[in-house]
Image (cartoon, rainbow, N blue to C red):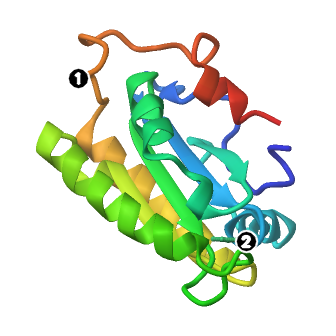
């Protein structure tokens, strides 16, 4: 999987780099029909992106309940990405329109809670835009790395990937 999906440097678990520095954990909820295909294309095209991202395939961005985003943060994610089809391209007609509205409110809520806006990102990436997927996850990993670990939910202790159903659930 690691070879195929283009993630570079696989072997160091997110949370700590080989050098002992902070490596963020990013959970990406990505639509099966567009962004997931873009991630796959990135791998096939050998476009490398950071191994910090755990991709979770969903059938539509409209299926991403805000609670799973909050749960991902609460269970150890330092950043969460939601990405779906471009407006007008949703395979379920209006799923991404609902997602856009819902996730905009969620972003405001998370910011109000003290979670930096850089930690939660919503994008629209089509199946052909592998380079955009690579750019987004690379930028997000770098910005979250600069912010450091998100500790507001765990009192400063890191949640292990093994004990986290959200992070663990994204493995293939
Ligand atoms: Fe991709 Fe709805 S099917 S966002």
The answer to which of marks 1 and 2 sits earlier in the sequence is 2
- 135 above or below 73? below
Residue 113: x and y, percent? 16, 38
Horizontal relation, residue 143 to residue 79: left or right: left
The one nearer the camera, 149 or 103, is: 103
| Label 1 to label 2: alpha-carbon separation | 32 Å
Horizontal relation, residue 7 to residue 95: left or right: right
Horizontal relation, residue 139 to residue 35: left or right: left
Q: Quadrant of ligand 1?
A: bottom right
**In the image as oriented, which residue stretches furthest toward the bottom?**
88
Residue found at x 39% / y 24%: 74
- 155 above or below 153? above
Residue 23 - label: none
The residue at which mark 2 appears reads as: 38
Residue found at x 63% / y 21%: 165
The residue at which mark 1 appears reads as: 152
Residue found at x 53% / y 13%: 160
Kindly indicate the quadrant of the structure image that contains residue 145. top left
Number of other residues with Cα within 10 Å of mark 2, as a class: few under 14, some 14 to 19, many 20 or more: many
Residue 102: x and y, percent? 39, 60
Dot 2: element:
helix
Residue 168: x and y, percent? 68, 24
């Amino acid at each position: 999987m690691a070879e195929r999906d283009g993630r570079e440097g696989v072997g160091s678990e997110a949370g700590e780099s080989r050098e002992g520095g902070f490596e963020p954990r990013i959970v990406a909820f990505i639509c099966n029909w567009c962004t997931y295909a873009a991630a796959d294309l990135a791998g096939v095209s050998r476009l490398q992106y950071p191994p910090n991202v755990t991709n979770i395939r969903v059938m539509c961005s409209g299926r991403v309940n805000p609670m799973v985003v909050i749960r991902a943060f609460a269970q150890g994610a330092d950043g969460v990405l939601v990405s779906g089809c471009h407006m007008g391209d949703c395979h379920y007609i209006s799923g991404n329109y609902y997602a856009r509205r819902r996730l905009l409110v969620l972003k405001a809520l998370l910011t109000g809670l003290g979670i930096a806006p850089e930690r939660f990102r919503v994008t629209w990436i089509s199946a052909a835009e592998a380079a955009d997927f690579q750019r987004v996850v690379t930028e997000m990993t770098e910005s979250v790395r600069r912010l450091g670990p998100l500790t507001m939910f765990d009192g400063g202790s890191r949640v292990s990937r093994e004990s986290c159903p959200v992070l663990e659930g994204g493995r293939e």
